[in-house]
Amino acid sequence: MPSHCLVTGVAGFIGSALAEELLARGNSVLGVDCFSDYYARELKEWNLRELRVQAGFSFQDADLRTADLASLLEGATVVFHFAAQPGVRKSWGPEFAGYVENNVVATQRLLEAVKGRALTRFVYASSSSVYGDAPDLPVRESTLPRPISPYGVTKLAAEHLCGLYARSFDVPTVSLRYFTVYGPRQRPDMAFSQFVRAIREDREIVIYGDGEQTRDFTYIKDAVAAALQAAQVDLSTPWGRVYNIGGGSRVSVNRVIRLLETMTGKTARINAQPAQPGDARHTSADCSAAAADLGYRPQVTLEAGLQEMVAGGRE
Ligand SMILES: NC(=O)c1ccc[n+]([C@@H]2O[C@H](COP(=O)([O-])OP(=O)(O)OC[C@H]3O[C@@H](n4cnc5c(N)ncnc54)[C@H](O)[C@@H]3O)[C@@H](O)[C@H]2O)c1
């Protein structure tokens, strides 16, 4: 049955793609975003351009840290909480306060505001960064989370808040631990987006570390499908569950560069820089819980997904 959904972070990479799919399936969406300055507003406006012309979509330029959340939640039965201050490397030092405000305090405000409302689901975008450098791969949800970045600490804190509000107030939360999401309109600070632009413009590609670090890369359509499944499937209580959402293809950064070279017919010029504090060496998701409970099965191979990025206009 179509729902009225609140999507936070709707001008972002994942939030905008999610809202497009929700509308395509006949839902109505109120999207909220404050255009944080982590990257250019014009890119976020670009993300919104197809949404803004659709009848079922409305938009509020609002900051979750201060907004009147009750009015934003009017009539909503599903909340997708995808707003956050992203980025591992910038989360050290004085910037950390902003991570706490946008990722932890804003999430707690939203959870307080939904308490007692007739929501069918509250889907929270968590992150593989909660795991840090896990000793055994692939990680399962039962692996002890030990973030190695301040960003990861804030994502884990917010995930715990979702668990707390589920247990104490029956808020129907489900947290999805996303593993590196990529695809058209990916955030400009993320590796694939940087690589594709650099190769196209014959600029150097900056790689941190030896390039043999591996990631479980998740294509945007699979990430969106997981969010829809988490909102729709008939999950039984207890709420507060957590699921790994990976793409099923764990590859090294060097392999990604080689694939891009083949796809573009160009040779990448590499500028190797030291590994950055906070970057995990490897990530790999065991998605069997999401498969069993949500029916989640990633559909898009890395080759196919990368091809979409290479072919697209705005990475
Ligand atoms: N992209 C990934 O690979 C990835 C991986 C794991 C988890 N996640 C999580 O998925 C979510 C979306 O990530 P993304 O890559 O689309 O990031 P993004 O930066 O493109 O989108 C996040 C949006 O949230 C908005 N925002 C931030 N603080 C806000 C506030 N206080 N009030 C209102 N809006 C606010 C920003 O303006 C931005 O448009 C985030 O929660 C992120 O932590 C992303």
Image (tube, helix red, strand yellow):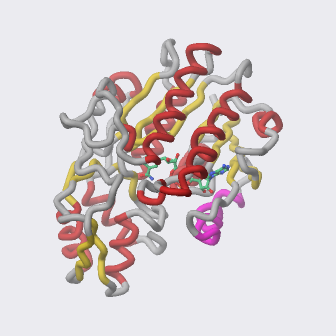
Above-or-below relation of 26 to 54: above
Q: Name which residue lies at 46% across and 74% down.
A: 313
Residue at the front extreme, as displayed: 93
Q: Quadrant of the C terminus?
A: bottom left
Q: Quadrant of residue 136?
A: top left
**Number of callouts in the render?**
0
Q: Name which residue lies at 64% across and 31% down.
A: 78
> Does the stretch in magenta take in 41?
yes
Nearer to us in this view, 80 or 38: 38
From where the camera sits, is residue 265 visible? no
Residue 264 lies left or right of residue 59; in this view the side is left
The picture places residue 29, in percent across and down from the top left corner, at 69, 44
The picture places residue 311, in percent across and down from the top left corner, at 37, 72
Q: Name which residue lies at 59% across and 70% down.
A: 40
From where the camera sits, is residue 220 visible? yes
Residue 56 lies left or right of residue 237; in this view the side is right
Residue 288 lies left or right of residue 229; in this view the side is left
Nearer to us in this view, 147 or 176: 147
Span shown in magenta: 40-53
Task: Specify the principal SS of the magenta part.
Answer: helix
Q: Quadrant of the N terminus?
A: top right
Residue 200 lies left or right of residue 56; in this view the side is left
Q: Name which residue lies at 62% across and 15% down.
A: 170
Above-or-below relation of 123 to 48: above
The picture places residue 202, in percent across and down from the top left corner, at 32, 87
Above-or-below relation of 202 to 217: below
> Does the stretch in magenta take in 3?
no
